[in-house]
Amino acid sequence: EAQQVQSDELGALRTLAQIVAHLDRTPAANTVAPTAPLRVAAAAPEAHTVAPRTPAELLETKVTKKELETREFVRAVDRLVLSKVALNGQAEGTSAPLPPGAKVWVTDDDPELAAALFDRLRDLDYTAKLVSARTLEASAVPPDLAGLVILSPRSSGGGAFLKHAFRLLRLCGPALRQSGANGGGAALVTVARLDGGFGLLGLNGGALPESGGLSGLAKTARHEWPEVRAKALDLDPEFTDAAQAAERIAGELLSTGPVEVGLSPGGRWTLELVPAPFDAHTPEQPIRAGDLVVISGGARGVTAEVSLALAKAFKPVLVLLGRSPVPQEEPDWLKGLESEAAVKQALASRANGSATPKQIEADYRAISANREVRYNLRRIEVAGASVLYKSVDVRDAAAVKKTLEAVRAELGPIKGLIHAAGVLADRLIEDKTDEQFDAVYGTKVEGLRSLLDALGPDELRLLVLFSSTTGRYGRRGQADYAAANEVLNKIAQSEARRRAGCRVVSINWGPWEGGMVTPGLRKVFEKEGVGLIGLQAGAEYLVREICSNGERPVEVAVLARGSAEAAGLAVSAEPVAGEPAAPPSRLTIVAGRGPAMPTEPDAALHVAFERDLDLDRHPFLADHVIDGRAVLPMAMAAEWLAQGALHQHPGLVFHGFNGLRIMKGIILGGTSGAPYRLRVLAGNGVTESDGHISVPVELWGSPGDGPQRLHARGEALLAQKLGESQRIFGDPPTRPYEHSMETVYGEFLFHGPALRGIQRVEGCSEVGIAATVRNAPPPLDWMKEPLRGSWVTDPLVIDCAFQMMILWSLELHDAGSLPNYVKRYRQFRRVFPKDGTRIVIHIAKDRSHMAGADIEFLDHDGRLIARMEGLECTIDSSLRQAFRKNLLGA
C-alpha cells in the first residue's frame, strides 16, 4: 500500500510537489523531487502509484454540490458535432453582382476548370484573367481588382499549394478591400476538391485534404476584410462537366449566402455544429494498460494535463515529444531556490556581472521550464503510467522517424497517437510573413504528416488530432492557424476511412486555460463571451470522447460551457453531474446552457421603459397558458424590445433584429400574484457599414422587489427608411394539411381566442409548412395603457409563425416545440397589411430535439413583408402534455 503520512508531518506538506516528494521519500526543496533517470520502469512500484480509475469510474464519479462549486468537471464543456445541411431548393442567396467589366482573377491550379470559369466570367461581361499563385508578383496586382477565385489542384502539391494561396491572398488583399470600400463590391471565393461536402460525404483516396485549408483562409478573410464577400466552396471531384461546375462557382461568386457551400452535381450543402451530448453507452477502451501512446506537444500545459488523465484512466506507456530539451537534474547551487527573485539573484551572482537582464530572464525561463517538465513527468508517473520524454521537432520528418523507430524497437508497437503540437504567430493577413505561416502551418500539418509517415498503416487503435475552433469559425490574425486546423480536420476524415478499427477524432478545441492563450487573447475571448476550457475539464472530456461507444463522429467541437451560446449556437441543456433533472411534470423553458447569467444590466444600457406585467393589465396573457401558467410570448418580447430601441432613438424606423435570444422564459404564477416588473433596456446605436443603426437591447424582470433576471437580449436594427427586398427561399413542396382549424386550436395548440391567428394551413411536409394568418388587433385590445397606438412588428403574425412550427413538429415528430432564438429578422414595411399575411416556412434543420427554419412573410400579392432567418426551436415530447394544460391553474 502507499506510504502513510503521519499527523505531525501534515503541516509541512503545503504543495502537490511536496506531497509527491514525501510519498517518494525524496527532499522537497526543489519544485519537483529529483529523479534520475527520468524514464520510469514499465511497471511503476505500487507504493508510488495512485490507484487509477477505470474509464467507467472516471466518467461516473459522483461529487457533492460543494465539490462542483470548487472543481471543474468533464460536463463543464459543451460538445458539438460537425454536420452537413442540404441547401437543395434554396437559391444561392441574394444577388450581389460585381460592377460591369470588373476585374476577376482565377488561379490556374486546375487548368480545365480554370479555363471553363474564365469563359463563364467573360460571358457575364467581366474582365477575367488566369493567374499563377506560384509566380505572381505584388506589382502585377491591379488596384481595382474586384474578384479572386482560388482553385485547388486536384490531387498533388497540397502543402506548397496552400502556402502559395496564402501568399496570393496577402498580395491581393489591399486591392480587394479598396474595391469593396469604393462601393462597387468585392468577392473572394476559394474552391476545394474534397467530396462536395467538406469531407462529410466520404473522402476517397484521391482527395486532397490540404485543399480543406482554403476554407480556413476564406473564413479568416471574412473577419479581417468586412468590405469583401468571402466564401469557401467544396467541389465534388465527381463533377466532371467543367462548364457546369464553372457556372455553379460563378453563381456563388455573384451572390450572398452561407460562407461554406459544398457543390455536387445533385445539390448544395453547408455545415453546422449540432449539440451532441454523449450517448448512454457502456464506455469502451481503445487503449489498455501497457499500450504505447505517443503524444506530441511536450510535457507542459495542456498536453501534460491530458497525459495525466490518460495515466489515471488507462495506465499506458506514454512517450511525450516536445521541442524543449530533455529535462536534467538541477545542479547543487540551484537546489533549494524556489522564488523567482532567489533564482535570478543566484544567476546574476554566478555570472559575476557579465550577464544582461535579458540573458538572466532567458536562463530563468529555461530553469522554470525544466522544473515544470520534471514535475509533470513525475505527476504522470505517480498517476500510474510509464513515461518517456523525447526532444524532437515534429516538422523534422527524418528525426521523427528515427525517434519513433527507436521507441518501437524498445517498447513495441504504437497503439495510440495524439497530435497536440502547435504554435501561434498572430498577424493580419496583409502583415503575416511567409516564415510565420510556415512555422504555424508546418507544426500542425507537416508535423502530423511526419508522425503518420513513421507509423504502419495497421498499427494504431487511436488517433486524436488537436484542432481548433479557429479553423471552424476563422479568427482575425490567425489565417495560418485556421488553415492548418482545417487541414487536420480533413486528414482525420481521410484517416478514419483508411484505418479500419482505429478510433479517429479531430477535436476542434475552444481556448484552454493554460494553453496558448495570451493575456491579450484572454481579453478578446472575455469580450466575445467565450470561456476558457479548464485543464482538468478538457483532459477528462478527452478520456470520455475516446471511450465513447455510441456514435463516433470524426470532427467534434468542444467549447467551455456557455461559449456555444456566444457563438450563436443552441446547446441542449445536459444536467451537470450531481444536479437532478427537472421533474417531468414541470415545464422548463430554456434556450440551452449559456454563459453565467448576469445579475444586473450592463451599465452602457439605459432603461427605455418599464411595465408591470399581470393578467389584469395584459388580459391577452390568459390566452397564452402552458402547464397552467401564463407565459409571455416570444413575439411580444420582441415587440417590446423593438419599441425600446425606437424609444432611445426617435425619428428612426424599425428594420429588424440580430441574435434575438430568450434567456429565460417569463412565467406568471397565477391570477392573484403580485405584478412582475419588466424593464426594457437599450444602448447607444452604432452605425453599421450598410448605414443601419445597431442597438443592443435587453429585457429584464423581477417579481416585485425580488432579484432581477435577464429574460431576452439581442440587437435591434433601425434605419432612416425601409427598402424593398425579394424572396430568396421560395415555397417548399408540401402535402395537403388534413386537420381543421377547430382541431388545430382545440387539440394541438394551447392558444386561446386572442392568439388564434392561423386561418388556413395550406400544406405541410418534412421540409416546410405554409399558412395564411390574420393580423393582431390594435394594442389597446390586448393590454391597458399600451406605449404605442400601433404595433412596430405584428406580434400575432410573428406568433403564428411559431404556432406553425408547433404544428410541423407535431406532424413530423409527434412532439411540441417552443422558439428560443432568431439569428436574423428583417422587416421591409413599417406595418403589416391589414388584409392578413401568408407565412411560408422552410425547414433548414431537423433534429430529434431541435428544429431550425427560415421564414418569409408575404402579402396576398406575393411581395415580401419580412424575413426571419435562423429560427431555432426546442422540440420536446413532454410539451404535448404541457400544452393541454392551457387554463390558468390547471
Image (cartoon, rainbow, N blue to C red):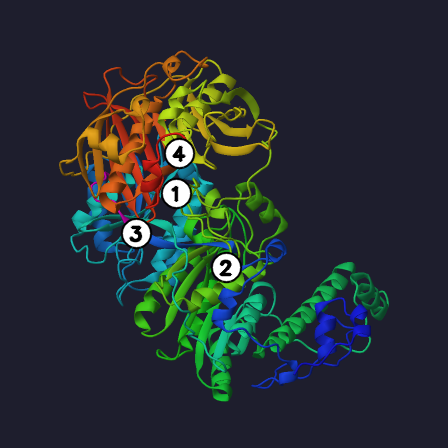
Kindly check if marks 2 and 1 are in contact, taking CB atoms under 8 A apart as contact.
no
Tell me if mark 4 has few (under 14), some (14-19) or many (20+) residues whose alpha carbon lies within 10 angstroms of its own. many
Q: What residue did someone put label 4 on? A: 628
Figure check: 353 above or below 715:
below
Q: Which residue is mark 3?
A: 84
Which marked residue is nearer to the observer: mark 4 or mark 1?
A: 4
Q: Which residue is mark 1?
A: 141
Q: Can residue 97 be seen at all in this image of the molecule?
A: no
Q: Position of residue 420 (x, y in %)?
A: 50, 65
- Which of pointers 4 and 2 indicates the residue nearer the eye? 4
Q: Which residues are magenta?
A: 84-92
Where is the N terminus found, in terms of image quarters? bottom right
What residue appears at the point 43 percent right and 20 percent down from the top-left corner? 618
Q: Nearer the viewer, residue 675 or 841?
A: 675
Q: What residue is shown at x 28% (from left), y 57% (from top)? A: 193
Identified by mark 2, the residue type is Val
Query: Which mark is nearer the camera, 2 or 1?
Result: 2
Kind of residue sitting beneath label 4: Gly
481 versus 803 height, above or below: below
Label 4 – label 3 distance at C-alpha:
39 Å
